[in-house]
């Protein structure tokens, strides 16, 4: 089907699900506008060290997808933009996008000269604020669009060193936000997720004890482009941990927090246990779990890790984490197999925090239907399709499959109302 003259499909969110939906729709003959609120595409997948079950980095697959987007004339990428307004029309939607000021434009060559002279450091959002970076920088090593981004609010009054250092006229410190209105045939919502906040888990040391981190922080720590250059270290003293405890269902399957299972946490912790053992072969790892969930072929991951030297899986619910003697952390655990309360100690505790839909707290202006947990639901009659973790918690492979189906449904809905 070749519908190059018809209104485009709008894909909101350019993580792995949004990129997949855009590519599938475009390669089926539809024009696509791919909108991302961050300055580059890739979403949370780019913050992962390794996928499971193959333990390969996401950068290689993402590089292929970026190349496909670059080479496909049917796809238009608008980064650093959000949907400000949406009005349903007879043939689809009229959508107004608010585009953040483009302080760095497409003339940027990534030469680094501006970043070298920048006098200001900011918390690096790509590294989950675990490190600092210049106020003007590339968002991350694999960023697309390939241009620098500037945290303008961090600039000292009157500072224009970056603009002076740029020989390509790529920096406009006076850039303003703009708006653009598009008529689109249908909408794919692929706005992804965020981790459940550590600060909401004080009983487990979240937000209070520096050596209690979330699984997403461990992922950044393990990668060479992360805040510790790939070294797994205790945040409190920068030393390698000798004992690491993974706490499953941290805030999940809990009516006080998230009542649902986030589907990937067990496998993520199993994968991260491998990170620890491979890098720190003298370490000891304990995974405290309610149930072990590794469906399908991922059962092989569970079997492999459970058999590793230095790894122990304990069926027990961790109720409290406190500071212990000598800088260690003390865990109070309900051992549900032995039916007794036990205590354990660890140098580093990793909380397997769950996935929270980005639609829960910041719904889009489409009057979308959401379930009780804040995940989006399709409304084909209104040309609104949901993809990836915006629909339900799932891993990367499932998100790409779901996004492929979403692209087909969006194309069908667009054709039905054309």
Image (tube, helix red, strand yellow):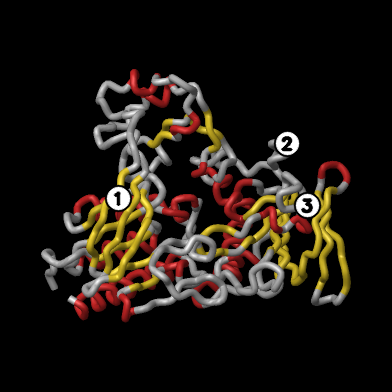
Identify whether 87 is placed above or below 415: above
Residue, disc 1: 78
* Mark 1 surroundings within 10 Å by alpha-carbon count, few (fewer than 14), some (14 through 19), many (20 or more): many
For the residues labelled 2 and 3, say whether their Cβ atoms are less than 8 Å apart. no
Residue at mark 2 to residue at mark 3: CA–CA distance: 14 Å
Give the image location of residue 72, x and y in percent.
Answer: 19, 55
Residue, disc 2: 237
* Mark 3 surroundings within 10 Å by alpha-carbon count, few (fewer than 14), some (14 through 19), many (20 or more): many
Residue at mark 3 to residue at mark 1: CA–CA distance: 45 Å
Residue 60 seen in the figure: no
Residue at mark 1 to residue at mark 2: CA–CA distance: 42 Å
**Residue drawn at the location 52% of the way across and 76% of the way down:** 371
* Left or right side of 180 for 190: right
* Mark 2 surroundings within 10 Å by alpha-carbon count, few (fewer than 14), some (14 through 19), many (20 or more): few
Give the image location of residue 247, x and y in percent.
Answer: 71, 61
Identify whether 162 is placed above or below 94: above
The nearer-to-camera label among 3 and 1 is 1
Give the image location of residue 381, x and y in percent.
Answer: 31, 81
Give the secondary structure at mark 1: strand
**Residue drawn at the location 78% of the way across and 52% of the way down:** 346
Residue, disc 3: 346
- Which of the 4 quarters of the picture holds residue 254? bottom right
Precedes in sequence: disc 3 or disc 1: 1
Q: Quadrant of the C terminus?
A: bottom left
**Residue drawn at the location 38% of the way across and 58% of the way down:** 13
């Amino acid at each position: 089907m070749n519908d190059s003259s018809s209104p485009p499909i709008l894909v909101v969110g350019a993580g792995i699900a949004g990129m997949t939906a855009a590519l599938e729709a475009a390669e089926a003959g539809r024009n696509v506008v791919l909108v991302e609120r961050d300055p580059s595409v890739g979403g949370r997948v780019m913050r992962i060290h390794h996928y499971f079950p193959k333990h390969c980095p996401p950068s290689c697959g993402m590089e292929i997808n970026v190349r496909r987007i670059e080479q496909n004339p049917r796809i238009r990428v608008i980064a650093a933009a959000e949907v400000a307004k949406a009005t349903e029309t007879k043939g689809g939607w009229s959508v107004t996008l608010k585009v953040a000021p483009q302080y760095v434009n497409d003339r940027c060559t990534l030469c680094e000269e501006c970043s070298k002279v920048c006098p200001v450091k900011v918390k690096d959002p790509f590294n989950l604020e675990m490190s600092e970076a210049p106020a003007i920088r590339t968002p991350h090593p694999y960023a697309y669009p390939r241009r620098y981004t500037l945290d303008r609010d961090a600039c000292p009054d009157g500072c224009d060193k970056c603009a002076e250092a740029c020989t390509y006229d790529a920096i406009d410190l006076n850039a303003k936000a703009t708006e653009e209105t598009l008529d689109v045939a249908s909408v794919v919502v692929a706005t992804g997720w965020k981790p459940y906040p550590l600060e909401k888990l004080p009983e487990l040391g979240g937000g209070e004890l520096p050596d209690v981190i979330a699984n997403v922080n461990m992922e950044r720590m393990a990668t060479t482009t992360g805040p510790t250059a790939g070294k797994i270290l205790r945040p409190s003293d920068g030393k390698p941990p000798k004992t690491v405890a993974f706490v499953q269902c941290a805030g999940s399957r809990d009516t006080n927090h998230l009542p649902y299972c986030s589907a990937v946490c067990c496998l993520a912790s199993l994968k991260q246990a491998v990170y620890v053992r491979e890098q720190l072969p003298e370490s000891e790892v304990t995974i405290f779990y309610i149930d072990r969930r590794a469906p399908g072929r991922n059962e092989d991951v569970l079997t492999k890790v459970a058999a590793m030297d230095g790894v122990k899986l304990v069926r027990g619910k961790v109720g409290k984490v406190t500071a212990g003697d000598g800088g260690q952390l003390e865990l109070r655990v309900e051992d549900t197999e032995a039916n007794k309360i036990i205590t354990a100690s660890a140098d580093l505790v990793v909380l397997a925090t769950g996935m929270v839909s980005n639609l829960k707290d910041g719904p889009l202006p489409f009057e979308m239907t959401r379930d009780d947990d804040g995940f989006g639901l399709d409304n084909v009659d209104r040309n609104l399709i949901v993809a990836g973790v915006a629909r339900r918690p799932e891993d990367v492979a499932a998100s790409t499959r779901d996004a492929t189906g979403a692209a087909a449904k969006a194309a069908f809905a667009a054709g039905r109302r054309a």
